[in-house]
Image: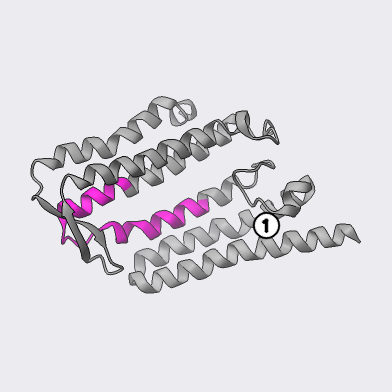
Amino acid sequence: MRRVFTSPLLAVVLIALPFVYLGVQYAGLPETVPVHFNAEGIADQFGAKSSLWLHTSILSTVAIGTYLLIRNLHKIDPKKTAKTSAATLNSLAIVILVFLTVINIMITYSAVNYPAKLSITTVVLPAVGLLLSFLGYQMRTIQPNYFIGLRLPWTLEDDENWAATHQLAARLWIPGGLIIAVTALTLPFFSAFIITMIITAAIVIIPTVFSYRFYRKKQG
């Protein structure tokens, strides 16, 4: 099962899904569709339905680039992240690809089903919360590198600082991401957005301060 989850074939399927979904829905779309939504999920910008292909292509390009970067991190990172297992990097790459695929599909879904209650604004914050929680879980095993993790001057120069900082970050990001997901599903978007910003700031700032104090303590 783990081999299937990290298979490049799964990545190809995920990248293709937004195009397949848009292709299936395309003939039934009106010539003008919503292409941007405000915080309440109300369309505030419209465009030709053909523009959905451009939106899908741009986000898919970002998804492909991110997937390939993380999957091949051990080959291009000058710090030689061989200590981070290929399985961990592959899992990270696939989960981020899933996240971007969901967002990509929801752009088309929101245009197809507007003004249905479920829109991209309904999905994006819960998805962000779950992604943060997963990243927190992976932080326990990510080794020093220049691309993923808390890449601070003190963590990059000291493996012990890196390990301690990321252990703390994991304990914050896992519950923090889950709280974001739950509040996003239960509160109005604006309230959930404010909570998301506060929690995100906290789970970044606290490990950063910890890392600096860890550095100063070792300096004596």
In this view, the residue in front, 160 or 61, is 61
The residue type indicated by label 1 comes to: Leu
Q: Which quadrant holds the N terminus?
A: top left
- Asked which colour scheme the image uses, the reply is one colour
Give SS at disc 1.
Answer: helix
In this view, the residue in front, 68 or 188, is 68
Magenta range: 104-133
Query: Above or below — where is 83 with respect to 95?
Result: above
Q: Which residue is mark 1?
A: 168
Residue under the image location 75 percent in, 54 percent down? 154
Residue under the image location 62 percent in, 57 percent down? 171
Q: How many marks?
A: 1
Q: How far from the left and from the top, in percent, is residue 107?
A: 26, 51
Q: How far from the left and from the top, in percent, is residue 137?
A: 57, 48
Locate residue 12: give its quadrant: top left
- Report the side of 70 relative to 141 (left or right): left
Q: Which quadrant holds the C terminus?
A: bottom right
Query: Above or below — where is 6 with respect to 142?
Result: above
Q: Is residue 120 magenta?
A: yes
Q: How far from the left and from the top, in percent, is residue 52?
A: 22, 46
Q: Is residue 169 magenta?
A: no
Mark 1, other Cα within 10 Å: few <14 / some 14–19 / many ≥20: some
